[in-house]
Amino acid sequence: MSTPATKPVKSLLVRGYEVVIGFETHAQLSTRSKIFSRAATAFGAEPNTQACAVDLALPGTLPVMNRGAVERAIEFGLAVGSHIAPRSIFARKNYFYPDLPKGYQISQFEIPVVQGGAVDFYLDDEKRTVRLVRAHLEEDAGKSLHEDFIGQSGIDLNRAGTPLLEIVTEPDIRSSAEAVAYAKELHKIVTWIGICDGNMQEGSFRCDANVSVRKPGAALGTRREIKNLNSFKFMQQAIDFEIQWQIDEIEDGRAIQQATVLFDPDSGETRAMRTKEDAADYRYFPDPDLPPLVIEPEWIERVRSEMAELPRVMAQRFVADYGLPEYDATTLTQSKAMAAYFEAVARSSGQPKLASNWIMGEVSRRLNASETAIEQAAVSAAQLAGVITRIADGTISNNAGRQVFEALWSGQGATADAVIEARGLRQISDAGAIERIVDEVMAANPDNVAQVKAGKDKAFNALVGQIMKASKGKANPQQVNELLRKKIA
Amino acid sequence: MPTVNKPLHELGVAELTTALRDGELSSVEAAQHFLERARSHHDLGAFLAIDEELTLRQARASDARRASGAAGPLEGVPIAHKDIFVTKDLPTTAGSRMLEGYRSPFDATVVRKLAEAGVVTLGKLNCDEFAMGSGNENSAFRPARNPWDITRVPGGSSGGSAVAVAARLAPAVTGTDTGGSIRQPASFCGITGIKPTYGRASRYGMVAFASSLDQAGPMARSAEDCAWLLSSLCGPDPDRDSTSLDRPTEDFTRTLTDSLDGLRIGIPSEFFGAGLAEDVRAAVEACLRAYEKLGAKLVPISLPRTELSIPVYYIIAPAEASSNLSRFDGVKFGHRAKQYTDLVDMYKKTRAEGFGDEVKRRIMIGTYVLSHGYYDAYYLQAQRIRRMIADDFQQAFKVCDLIAGPVAPTVAWKLGGHGNDPLADYLADIFTLPASLAGLPGMSVPAGFGEGGMPVGLQLIGTYFSEARLLNAAHRLQQATDFHLRKPEGV
């Protein structure tokens, strides 16, 4: 049963219409062999070299469930807080197509293995929740190749029988940006827990978006399904185009017909493939070749105990153990590598909030600019911890810290301490030394001192600037401030 | 030795095994003898494929295994397989034009297990197309003839299997039973056949008709011979068939001679109603009296949904068949129409040409009952009643140890006797369908003769995994009667 979304959905009206989007995502599960046969699932092999008798649907062959595929479905269900059905049913979806060797696809229909759950993510610093209806196991079809076979089609059955988890949401998404944010979060979850390699080019993570529009408060509009969105960029473009197209149709007085559409990246448009009139009757019925899939609680517990810490659990831990704000914790758990980097810096420096600021600031900025993954960051966690340690213990200023970081990033030095020594960035915290400089500057600028006494703060700042300059930026600014106030008061 | 006094083809599996073991006979000699018989009885239409060279090669290998001390329990026994089982070394057609010329790259598990037990394969046996039929008249290639009267059907769908055993072309064979396809032809041809509990024999490599019902089993002249084969062909096959049950193989020959003293035999009143022909009733009732003499007690029981088993079966089986047969689309293997204009035309012509009338009829029925808007009224409702039928049996087994009755309402009918009336065929399945729907083991045991001197079969039905008990009851009857030893004239 569905529970209400955590927050009332904030509508971003488009030309006065509310956008309603639901997602169906096919995540290819990372098993070595297929869902019902022992053939390999590796991508890119010569056509039909990874299709065994079962995949070819030769007479007498029968499906045997791949345990690994079930475990991955359980992992996903645990990751998104779903109910794992103790007993789920495989069904046959019957239709004729040359790349569907049995003439039916084995899927789950009435009772799926994963039921309910939700995906939480941030969109523009606002927490969003998209509820899941279900996630079910099914087999992929082969591929029809229409090029290179003049007047004929080629069939490659390497992909036939590849395990898929189809993840279906409630229609909780209200904009193309939110759709992309959801898809990215889902992508993060499946790759984080390792059930899917997430390779969108190779089709390991394919999204279908059901899009409709309505006047606020009206009943749901008729939806059109955009199939096979395999990049986040196209996803946003396709949905934006579709929204405008549907609004145009309605504004022009035409009703939306339920249809399946494809996005053409070249034209930037969506095009109908088939309408509801040609919708097939799939004649679903329970597959008599496969007994109900029974999942005992012990199995779920074993899978749970062997699972990596989930992003949202890890984020909660970051809040509890490191005192991070929830936003920081969520951002730092965008990937396992990012989280690991943070933890290494935080532990080594003892400064989790500083570590978070640096990683979300300097480090992310540079990674984004150079399109580099954090695994390849030019400054290691240990090096960054060195910088932060020196800022925290007052050895260097924040400004000097940035210089040290820049030097480390560009390879000019091995450790923060080495850079600090080489460049003489250590700040002066010796009270006697600072006092001498303060006295000198005050003596040289009697007008400013007089103005400060008259209550002008600008003059105070000017004096601080002079003192910092005289110390070549090395004086501890806090100490300078305190000393100056004391002397002038 | 008693065996030498009989022609080779009169020896049963047990006797052959002994003769082969004692060196009175080689595997090659046995194979040659039966190949010769198959050749001279070609007109009966029992076989669809024979490869004498292959058979002799297997027989020589069998003799070599025996010489090296590696003989299996059925070493050198020549058998033949219903053409529903896929075989690497022989073509597999399932009695259909659709699979003419098809070669499987693997052997069915049942075929493999029997080969591992040492059998030599004589060939592939005729059957109704995709095992759909009760008279073997739906074979796309040729009808099989009942050796007791060649103007009559041998029953079906394992018709060729029953003919081969009754005509002594093979001491034992394999068959498959979906709604009675082992028991009914066994009954019509006066031989013994057993369909084990659903899930006891692997379905891997059986061309699927109705997945939730299909089950392999042996057919032979006696219960003892069936026990020999069944002991080898059963067993779990979890890596290939998910519906195969985790139940260890048994030696079904061990308890054959157990006493029947105190055995409670349930007699379902619904099996002895107005639809039962008088000659069949008389033969079956005589057997029941023989059981009483053996110490068994007859207990009246009721299987109230017996009649419903016909509509239930003829919804569920076609539904599954319509889906199972979708793979025959001309794309990957089997028949493809020579000329077509586009993909849909290719599908239509391929299937129109490749399938026979009865197969098409069942595909249409099955497609209909699974269609949107009809599924609940037909398929779901049939599944509900199927469960009740299974429950009725469990109620009955509270007061009896096994159930006995006729296999079929009549003896074998004339070839073409049902004309073009498929319903007449369907109604004749009434006594075999209930056990199929419940997944129970059932067997047919020769019970005497009826109209036209045609054999009558006694059906024994047991609860799940009671094959040993059934074979024991059948064997004891066969010790007390000689129906299973009678043979058709001219054989």
Image: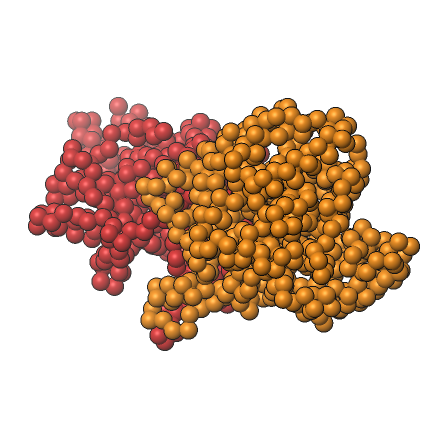
Q: How is the image coloured?
A: by chain
Q: Quadrant of residue A330?
A: top left
Where does the N terminus of chain A fall, quadrant-wise?
top left
Give the residue displayed 30% in from the left and 30% down from the top: A5
Chain identity for the colour orange used in the image:
B
- Asked if A294 appears above or below B426 in the picture, the reply is above
Question: Foreground residue, A332 or B430?
Answer: B430
Chain identifier matching the red colour in the rendered picture: A
Q: Residue A118 appears in which quarter of the rendering? A: top left
Which quadrant of the structure image shows residue B247?
top right
Q: Position of residue A155 (x, y in %)?
A: 43, 66
Taking the image as shown, residue A303 lies to the left or right of residue A13, namely right
In the image as oriented, which residue stretches furthest toward the bottom?
A150
Residue located at (69% from left, 69% from top): B39
Residue A25 seen from this side: no
Q: Which quadrant, please, contains the C terminus of chain A?
A: top left
